[in-house]
Image: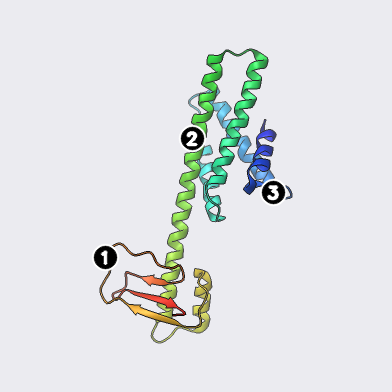
Amino acid sequence: SIAEISAAIQSEVAEYTRPFDASYARALGQAVQHAVDTFIDRVAHPGTPMAAILTEFRGIGAAEAREGRSLEPLQAALRLGARVGWRRLCAIAAEQGLDALALGRAGEAIFVYLDELADASAQGYLEARAEFAGERERRRRRLLDLILADPPAPAETVAEAARAAGWPQPAQVSVVVLGEPHHADTPSLPDDVLADWSRREPCLLIPDP
């Protein structure tokens, strides 16, 4: 049942254990309800459109990324939901005497459906991560431009840009000018180093040298 799947996710997936968050519990129940309803419709009518449920799970994956969680809790919740659904289906099959072939086909349909929801959530997750990374990089480049501006940008403007970029302002900095446009793969740098490889003179800003 819907309640059984929701309760299992909240009790067995640690990241989703929010017993006092009524709005979260309601959102979880709605997502499970929509997923189960769509699956039932699909079994009864194989041509049932999947766009709405896949869009919903792309959104769920994106929300996980924006909250800073890994994708594994969501994937674990999907696997758990499929297992609970499968157990429930087996119990119904035993009660109604369904043959093994029909039960096998239903089980296969459950896990194909699980893969589709997992793929949709992963797509939403990766898209949101890429969007976040791109926005963060733009904010860091703007911050570097403000720090290097001549004449200097107002201190309040720099402080606001630093907060937006998630960059703690250090007591002092050093600037390393690389001199030539950088076309090779950019090296991995510590997170507190600001870099802009696209400038006419690429440079690094190193805090507290």
Sequence-first disc among 2 and 3:
3
Neighbour class for label 3 at 10 Å: few (<14), some, many (≥20)? few
Amino acid at circle 1: His
Up the image or down, 83 lies above or below 97; here it is below
Q: What residue is disc 2 on?
A: 115
| Tag 1 secondary structure | loop
Q: CA distance from mark 3 to mark 1?
A: 48 Å
Neighbour class for label 2 at 10 Å: few (<14), some, many (≥20)? some
Of all residues, the one furthest to the right in this rendering is 20
Residue shown at 61%/29% (left/top)?
85
Residue shown at 27%/77% (left/top)?
179
Quarter of the figure with residue 199: bottom left
Label drawn at residue 90: none
Q: What residue is disc 1 on?
A: 183
Of all residues, the one furthest to the bottom in this rendering is 151
Amino acid at circle 2: Asp
- Residue 117: percent from the left, percent from the top? 51, 37
Sequence-first disc among 3 and 1:
3
- Residue 93: percent from the left, percent from the top? 63, 17
* Quadrant including the C terminus: bottom left
In the rendered structure, the answer to whether residue 148 lies left or right of residue 41 reads left
Q: What residue is disc 3 on?
A: 18
- Residue 49: percent from the left, percent from the top? 49, 32
**Residue closest to the eye, 178 or 110:** 178
Q: CA distance from mark 1 to mark 2?
A: 39 Å
* Quadrant including the N terminus: top right
**Residue closest to the eye, 149 or 203:** 203
Of all residues, the one furthest to the front in this rendering is 209
